[in-house]
Image: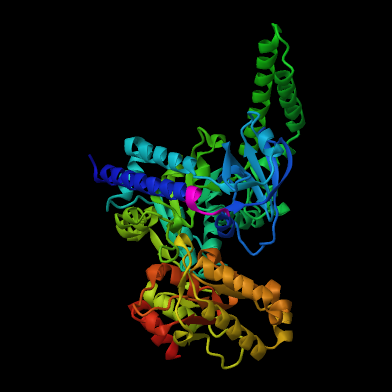
Amino acid sequence: MTNSIQALQQQRLLLQIEYAAEKDAFRKQTEEMGLMRKVKRGDAWWPLKMGKSYYNSLNQLVVEVFRQGEDDEIEHNFEYGRPVAFFRIDGKDQIKYFNFTGTVSFVDGDRMVVAVPDNGQLIYVQGAEHVGIQLFFDETSYKTMFEALDRVIRAKGRLGYLRDLFYSHQPAETFSFAPMHFPYLNRTQEEAVNKVLWAKDVAVVHGPPGTGKTTTLVEAIYETLRRESQVLVCAQSNMAVDWISEKLVDRGVNVLRIGNPSRVNDKMLSFTYERRFEAHPDYELLWAIRKAIRDLRAHRKRGDEKYHQKLERLKERAIEIEIRINAQLFGETRVIASTLVGSASRLLEGQKFGTLFIDEAAQALEAACWIPIRRVSRVVFAGDHCQLPPTVKSFAALKAGLGKTLMERIVENKPEVVTLLKMQYRMNEEIMRFSSDWFYGNQVESAPEVKYRSILDLDIPMTWVDTEELGEEEFVGESFGRINKAEAELTLLVLEQYFQKVGKQRILDERLDVGIISPYRAQVQYLRRLLKKREFFKPYRSLISVNTVDGFQGQERDIILISLVRSNDEGQIGFLRDLRRMNVAITRARMKLIILGDASTMTRHPFYKRLYDYIEAL
């Protein structure tokens, strides 16, 4: 038995531990957590207004629901593909669940469309009072990951070859032809695209913050499409899939997006499978036949001898039209884009591709990456394992290595297939320098046009406001983390003072945008509430966003403030020890970075000590 098979069996075991831990946490949350806590965490909507139900273009029964209530600063966690359950509150204030689960088909602001089983159960929800909806445990994603691992463990042929290659130091195979030149890419971006084109098996594009990873990836996909008729592009999250799809569409590439986008606008919707399917000239005929099938079922007469014949004839006709529409849609598209788990969609059954591109690959569990790899003969990973890691809930599974991604494994085993992008176009040199030194061996440089960018003349690009005197953090409930109210107040005061220095007119004219980041969700929500109440910030409301580190992944702002929250005598900093998160936080700022934190608590850790000293020395 090869090492690779043993290692994958170990992965499967760890995934099983994670599955059990998440399922148990979900059960506890469902049984013990109060409804308003779920609403505040963004895991439930209540009260709910029920809208109309209808059959969508994929012939699923769906129902519209609307979030009611005042709390619009709560960002919810509902997104396409996630399982949900309806509940009602009875006379004794008990939560009673309806006995079926649905799937989110579409979310836009306070409106959501949910696909539900077509078994007559929906009527009970529509007739009930005090109804709500909450996220449900995601059994399907785990099932899909387990299936993928099992298949890879048993694999022969190309998949078996890739499995053994990824787990060994055996060199990956390459083509050899003269490098191509791309005048609008820098040297390392050009090298990355060439490495992708030369790769027979695998290539990795390692993109530190602001280095144009997406630009490079789009170019690599575009060039690959000159050699292949179709490629598969995946990412861990819906948001990342949307982002790369949008850039490809801007480049004139025909993209078919499996699943619904996280941001809902006409441009994004226009390349979704559902919208294209509906727009096909044969769709009206198909819809009419499906309606006839439903009517026939609903009005079946006793003793109708021909019922089954009629039904079968209509079904055959519907399937024939559906196959014809799909063949045309898939036949004319150049890029099929989906999440990693979404690539298991029945729509892709039996499809094979030459190349798979996985974006944000450093945020995906290894098992999730194997789902689309089963369909391809070579893989290109793009991401940055020095930024956000995959989410792992079980500490035991994390310690035993579940958090180690396939991209990281390949970076370790095959440094020759990796290209590090070295020129960044986002940050002032001094903001970038610390991250480059600590995380990237001092290899990242600033493009000349951003090197000295700043808002005020002689401004110091990074400052640390020490909050030691303000008092300690407070603990708010199990999974909600911590809050430091005095630090939150000071954060807004510091921003107000900075705005006064810059001047109102200039902020509004130049639309200088601000991100306020805190690693803790409780602090984020507290900051949002404070911000709403402050009269001073009214004119700037649209320019300021407050979110967690994860919420700012892939984004940038002119000014960033980070509230670190932790302040205690023991020097405990909890999950701030995960330095990759801090790397994301400090590299969002283009021109000004202000960190607020208790220096005596934070600087007991070597990373924060070095960061504090670096800023003090500027």
Q: How is the image coloured?
A: rainbow
In front here: 168 or 47? 47
Estimate the x, y position of residue 461 in percent, counting from the top left: 53, 86
**Could one spot residue 190 in this view of the protein?**
yes
Rendering quarter of residue 502:
bottom right
In front here: 113 or 302? 302
**Could one spot residue 448 in this view of the protein?**
no
Rendering quarter of residue 309:
top right
Query: Quick one: quadrant of the N terminus?
Result: top left
Please report the residue visible at 45 percent of the width from the left and 57 percent of the height from the top: 363
The residue furthest left is 1
**Position of 561 relative to 328 (above/below):** below
Query: Quick one: quadrant of the C terminus?
Result: bottom left
Estimate the x, y position of residue 19 in percent, counting from the top left: 40, 46
Q: Give the side of residue 259 with respect to residue 317, left or right.
A: left
**Position of 116 relative to 482 (above/below):** above
Q: Main secondary structure of the magenta part?
A: helix
In front here: 292 or 566? 566
Estimate the x, y position of residue 85 in percent, counting from the top left: 58, 42
Query: What are the residue bounds of the magenta stretch?
Result: 29-35
The residue furthest bottom is 458
Rendering quarter of residue 258:
top right
Please report the residue visible at 58 percent of the width from the left and 42 percent of the height from the top: 96
Q: How many marks?
A: 0
In front here: 142 or 327? 142
